[in-house]
Image (tube, helix red, strand yellow):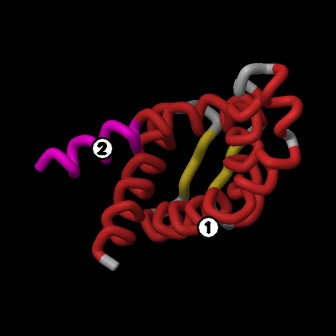
Amino acid sequence: MMQFLVRWGIGALSIFIVAHIVRGIEVSSTATVLVIALVLGIINAFLRPLIILITLPINIVTLGVFTLFINGALFLLVSKIVKGFVITGFWPAFWGYILFSIISFLLSLLVVSV
C-alpha cells in the first residue's frame, strides 16, 4: 500500500511540474492533479499494454518510437476524462508525457536512494 501511495505522489508531483512547464497543459487544482495521477496510472496499467500489443508491428518498424505517440495520445485521453485538466492539442500532450516520464523517473531515483 505504501509503494502505491509513493508512486501516486510521484506521479502527481510530476504532473504538477509538467503543467507549470509545458504550454498548453493546464490543471485547475491540487485535487485535480491527484485524480489525473490516479487515472493516468490506471490507463497505463490496463489500456497501454493492450494498445502496444495491437500496434506491435508499427512499433517494430519504427524501433519503438511509435510508443511515444501512443503515450502522448493516452495523456490526451486522460485530459478528456478528467475535468479541470486541459491539454490544447496533441503536441503539448506528446512533449508533456515525455517530460512527465523523465521527471517521474528522476523522482523515483531520488525516493529510492533516500
Side of 23 where 9 appears, left or right: left
Residue 78 rendering spot, x and y as whole percentages? 69, 57
- Left or right of residue 114: residue 37: right
* Residue 8 screen position, x and y as percent: 41, 64
Per the image, the residue denoted by label 1 is 42
Residue under the point 53% across and 68% down: 38
Magenta stretch prevailing secondary structure? helix
Report the number of numbered marks: 2
Q: Is residue 109 above or below residue 5?
A: above
**Under tag 1, what secondary structure?**
helix
Residue corresponding to mark 2: 107
Which residue occupies the extreme left position in the image? 114
Q: Which residues are magenta?
A: 103-114
Q: Quadrant of residue 1?
A: bottom left
User: In the image, which disc is placed on residue 32?
Assistant: none
Mark 2: which secondary structure?
helix
Residue reaching furthest to the top: 62
State the residue in front, 95 or 7. 7
Residue sitting at 58 percent across and 47 percent down?
26
Question: 86 and 78: which one is in front?
Answer: 78
**The residue under label 2 is which amino acid type?**
Leu
The x, y position of residue 63, in whole percent, is 73, 21
* 69 to the left or right of 45: right
